[in-house]
Amino acid sequence: MKIKLLVLAVLQTVFLGVFAQQNPLTIEQPKIEYQTNPLGIDAPAPRFSWKLHSLKKNTTQLSYQILVGYSEKMTGKSLVWNSEEVASDASHLVDYQGKTLQSRRRYFWKVTVKDNHGNEASSATQFFEMGQLAPADWTAQWIEPEKEGFDEKKMQPVPLLRKEFVSKGKVVSARLYVSSHGLNEIEINGKRVGDALLAPGWTAYQSHIQYYTYDVTNLLKVGPNAIGAMLGDGWYRGFLAWENNRNVYGKRLALLAQLHVRYANGSEQIVGTDNTWRASNDGPLRQADIYMGETYDARLEKAYSTAGFGDKIWWNAKVQDYPKNNLVAPAGPPVRRVEEIKPLKIFKTPAGETVLDMGQNMVGWVRFKVKGAAGTTVKINHAEVLDQKGNFYTANLRTARCEVNYTLKGGEVETYEPRFTFMGFRYVRLTNWPNEPALDDVVGVVIHSDMATSGTFACSSPLLNQLQHNIVWGQKGNFVDVPTDCPQRDERLGWTGDAQAFARTAAFNKDVAGFFAKWLRDLAADQKPNGVVPFVVPDALRNDIGSAGWADVATIVPVDMYNVYADKRLLANQYPSMKKWTNYVRKEAGESHLWRSGFHFGDWLSYRGQDVLFSEPVTDNDFIATAFFAHSAQLTAQAALVLGKVQEAVAYGELYEKIKKAFNQEYVTPSGRLVCNTQTAYVLALHFDLLPDNLRPQAVERLVADIKAHKDHLTTGFLGTPYLCHVLTRFGKNDVAYALLNQETYPSWLYPVKMGATTIWERWDGIKPDGSFQDVGMNSYNHYAYGAIGDWMYQNMTGIQLGEAGYKKIIFAPKPGGGISSAKATYESPYGTIVSEWKIENGQTKLSMGVPANTSAQIALPNASPERVSQLAKAQNLKVKNGMIEVGSGMYSFNY
Ligand code: BGC
């Protein structure tokens, strides 16, 4: 018997091997709207994407055919759309063009492609399910659990809601659609529904609110069932921004939930929120707030989401007539628990406090174990750093308490983790622990928007690898549904300046297509009628000032996202907002084409020198404002062109030229000196192409001279920093870019690394060399803005650049330097994995590149003469054009 099995296994392998040889083409990662088999999407014409994987070089797609059906058969009556065979190489974001898709319905789909080598491949059958497409689909009603008459200025107990219902038979499928004012967590029959955290996320609530869709089939049982819900204050009505600011979106929590149960006999039962739902404020969560933390009394736990629970003393929820035409399916991934971290050590500080070191400045919370007498309250506090003496330091959190108070129910070991808050911390302080706490009493739970990792970067410098690590962790901690400035103090807002600085880097590290699509929709919704983009999105500050370099996020991020993901629909959605912003500044600037009005943050947190030999490196705000005005006009013109709006492209192009002219007259001397002799001034003028060709070389020299005068240190802030090394490399000063990157003393990227940072700091000198701190009023140790150097590391160190939007064409232009002997990056593009790797050893350069199927690339070999390039190309039968080697898909290596 055993031998028979063995023979079978061998035969199978041989057969599969042969089979694989015959089918060198496969389809991978079939997705719809960037998601795999999603539930509850609401795009009327969702878009299909897939990746070709080929064992052969130079593979391109010749045609595709998409089938969509009500069932997996996708033939006859069950066929919903047959695209027929389309001669096209499009494999990314292909529009659905079949019959109107219906609410809550599941559709199956698959794609078949043919390639240029005569191979054909089909994807496995996939599905997608539509959500609630029309307001009328919501038969449930918005309900509020709280009674009148509480103090709205104070945190309230987290209300509980419940509803029992009887399931009449075997359930084939069940879906729960949920939204809320405030955060929600739902349970069915005592079990948590789904794994989304901080649902329904933070949007411009006054404009639109997300609902989440859950498959709850397995949570239901025949007979009596119960649904329970908890509602947290969250961003909706909790503390937000400063000075005890609360209730930004409303004063009352509310729930909207609709359960659709389908039975084997085809019948459907709907259970929706209405005035029969029972409510209570006697739950265990006595307080929950994003900034403040949680207060939990385990003695008040109850099985409220199980059938038969006695809710006699509860009251009926109140129905409210809130709109339902503003409910949208999530465009981006939900926040989830993404990883866990074990603390490195537990110790007593000089002040005698018990503190754990997580070894990483992280965002989320801790799950802890504790055993003790009922009624004992333990306290957990969170801090990013220890002070000079080694004591627990929380002053930089400002009024954010970031504290968990847990009252034990007593008996067995109790485990707890919060749900309606999050903290940014590396150190955890335990107070009033019943017994001596142990290292394994605590686990760090890292939460963030669940974006897939798209890029990896490593090189021969351990310090630069730590910098990359810090950039990635800055991204994890600040991509918690909204791109925030910081995750710890009483702020955590969607600061637009920070987001525009970092978006391009973010797209290298993680798949941010959905994340930014969601946020850009909020941006457009929160844009003022006059075109002003507020400081923060969602607009929790309710301000109506457009600051240069902050509000320009409206043009910068959509174009960044278009470049990376070739998502025309996103660009088209944002285009009106882009225009509105550019037109607003045009109006402000008037005929002068110089933007000299308003308030601007300027080159925020730039280095302020103390050396008397140097003038203070301050870049005038009106200089910056006009430079960004030009940039926004240029980006709007580019977007218009992509969208086929030629006349508008010409008009914004002309505007850009006029601004340039005015800029040169106002801020540039005839010999090319800028009125502000700062690194940022030269960087912006060069990066935005504001100077005439003949004045560029000397502008570059002046920039370099300034860097040299500062002994290879940067002086740039939030606005200059992202472009600094790009400008240097572009204008032939790659060595200077590396000198800045490798700089280990303040101000530099590696100074915090040398000081032990595990994330990117808000300020170049958050901790001074003597261990003292920067201004306590604004000193975050997890602020991603300066992490924008990551973009340069990927694009120039490893040289992965865009040849065409979405990486349909790739340019490899690695620029070794700075004593780095090797570097490698991978990047998961819409077409597949791009790889770029180089090594320099004993004067030999070894390069290898991976080009995904259905794309092509141009390779610029570093440190090789044109003759050498020709030779190397010829040896592999490759063509050279403009000094670059042209290749189709496949792996390539060069050794010289
Ligand atoms: C934030 C920033 C933001 C800035 C505006 C700060 O409080 O943390 O990162 O961009 O204000 O200048």
Image: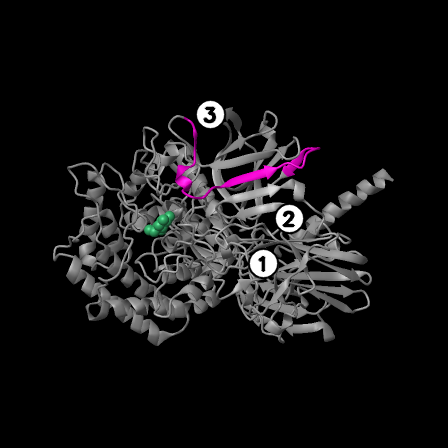
Residue pointed to by mark 3: 349
Mark toward the start of the polypeptide (1 vs 3)? 1
Between 478 and 845, the residue placed more toward the observer is 478
Q: Where is residue 699 in the image (x, y as percent from the top left)?
A: 20, 51
- Quarter of the image holding residue 633? bottom left
Instruction: Indicate whether residue 412 is drawn in magenta.
Output: yes
Q: Residues within 10 Å of mark 2 (few under 14, many from 20)?
A: many
Q: Is residue 779 above or below residue 184?
A: above
Q: Where is residue 625 in the image (x, y as percent from the top left)?
A: 26, 59
Residue pointed to by mark 1: 35
- Quarter of the image holding residue 173? bottom right
Q: How crowded is mark 3: few (under 14 residues within 10 Å), some or many (20 or more)?
A: some
Question: What residue span does the magenta drawing correspond to?
Answer: 390-415
Residue type indicated by callout 2: Gly
* Left or right position of 804 against 14: left
Residue type indicated by callout 1: Gln
